Image: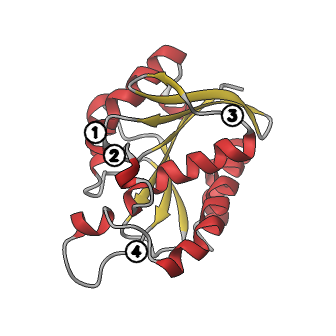
Amino acid sequence: MAAKLIVGLGNPGPKYTWTRHNAGFMVLDRLSSQSGISVTRKAFSGLSGDGNWAGERVYLLKPQTFMNLSGRSVAEALRFYKLSLSDLIVIHDDLDIPFGKVRLKEGGGHGGHNGLRSLAQELGSTSFARVRVGIGRPLHGDVVNFVLTNFAKEEMNELLDVLDTSLDAIEMAMKEGMPKAMSIFNAK
């Protein structure tokens, strides 16, 4: 069984810590704390760590390049670990999914997400597994500003459940495959 590179997308720095766009970082931080795998080693223009989680060898990565250049960091890590796109799981925020929902997807376009756009450019493909963390869409106003706002207080109360659901989805995808995990989590 090949190892997995699990990447959380987000923006570095305290200013962005609790923003919607950092949902990928938040899931990876939760995985790090649950698994005891520290994600503090500076490598691949990011912070990385590795260990065993859910009976699998995993490499964890939080690109520190800012969202729109995160593909560079991911491409570096894949090359270094000699992993293929089928070994990659990318966790990111998704405007088209209501807050509180987690969806899985294999391949597809970038949907205007700059992190996914960067990955597609650097990897030359979009055929990798994605864990899409719903952040909802603003009723009015600018989407760019919305993704860089912090989660609302009511949402913060539910955030831990969302992060744990994301981890359950990743674990099932690794153990039982994406089709099975998608059939369970995309129906919720």
Secondary element type, mark 1: helix
In the rendered view, does 16 fall on the left or right side of 174? Answer: left
Say whether disc 4 or disc 2 marks the residue closer to the N-terminus. 2
Task: Assess disc 1: are there few (<14), some (14-19) or many (≥20) residues with their C-alpha within 10 Å of its C-alpha.
Answer: many
**Disc 2 marks which amino acid?**
Leu
Going from N to C along the chain, the mark reached first, 1 or 4, is: 1
* Mark 2 touches mark 1? (CB < 8 Å): yes
Do residues under tags 3 and 2 come within 8 Å of each other at their CB atoms?
Answer: no
Residue 187, image quadrant: bottom right
Q: Which residue was labeled with disc 2? A: 116
Count neighbours of disc 3 (C-alpha within 10 A) and say few if under 14, some if 14 to 19, many if 20 or more. some
Which residue, given by chain and number where applicable, does mark 3 sit on?
Answer: 37
Q: Amino acid at mark 1?
A: Ser
Are there few (<14), some (14-19), or many (20+) residues within 10 Å of tag 2?
many
Tag of residue 136: 4
Label 1: which residue?
118
Quadrant showing the C terminus:
bottom right
